[in-house]
Amino acid sequence: MNHDNTLILMNTDKSESWHDLLVWQKAHTAALAVFNVVKGFPPEECHRLSDRLCRAALAVPTGIAEGKGRGSVAEFRQALTAARGSVEETRYLLLLARDLGYLTTVTHAAIESAYAEISKMVTATLKSLKTSGPA
């Protein structure tokens, strides 16, 4: 599914708040899914993989919201770049959790698919901001 046109409309000057950003909405939903699945991890993972995975997942919508709230395109780009890194960290940690047997293949595939889409959306948003000029 191509989100480029929707993304540009939802992620540039036309949206007033980070709440309006489709990429933030999807990142928030994915973070909720991560927080839900780590509840089923073994107790010994509470301060290792669970915490790290939750922090990485939380950094995505948090970074998008913070960047949008700063008000300048340059700062928004910087925050989106950091959020993209957190997306990839989350994707790796989900893979690790699956390989350790903490996530089923089906659960992993569903959440991974969401983060793959978010990664594309963040990249498209960054591209749209680069074409909109400096601010």
Image: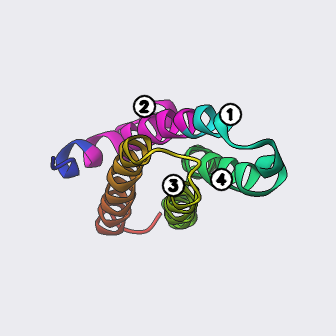
Residue bearing mark 3? 98
Q: Nearer the viewer, residue 110 or 71?
A: 110
Residue 67 or residue 87, whichever sits in front: 87
User: Disc 3 vs disc 2: which is toward the camera?
Assistant: 3
**Local crowd at mark 3 within 10 Å, few (<14), some, or many (≥20)?**
some
Q: CA distance from mark 3 to mark 4?
A: 12 Å
Left or right side of 26 for 51: right
- Tell me the kind of residue under disc 3: Arg
Badge nearest the viewer, 3 or 4: 3
Magenta span includes 22: yes
Looking at the image, is mark 3 or mark 1 earlier in the sequence? Answer: 1
Residue corresponding to mark 2: 20
The reply to whether dot 3 and dot 4 touch (C-beta < 8 Å) is no
Label 4 with label 1: CB-CB less than 8 Å: no
The residue that appears at 56% across and 32% down in the rendered structure is: 32
**Residue ID for mark 4:** 53
User: What is the magenta segment's predominant secondary structure?
Assistant: helix
- Give the number of the mark in front: 4 or 1: 1
Question: Magenta region: which residues?
Answer: 7-33
Report the side of 126 relative to 87 (left or right). left
Could you give the CA–CA distance between mark 1 and mark 2, rounded to whole angstroms?
29 Å
Q: Amino acid at mark 2?
A: Asp
Residue 25 spot, x, y in % from top left: 44, 34
Could you tell me which secondary element the residue under label 4 belongs to?
helix
Q: Residue furthest front?
A: 101
Q: Secondary structure at mark 1?
A: helix
Dot 1 or dot 2: first in sequence order is 2
Measured as percent of width and height from the top left, residue 14 is found at 34, 38
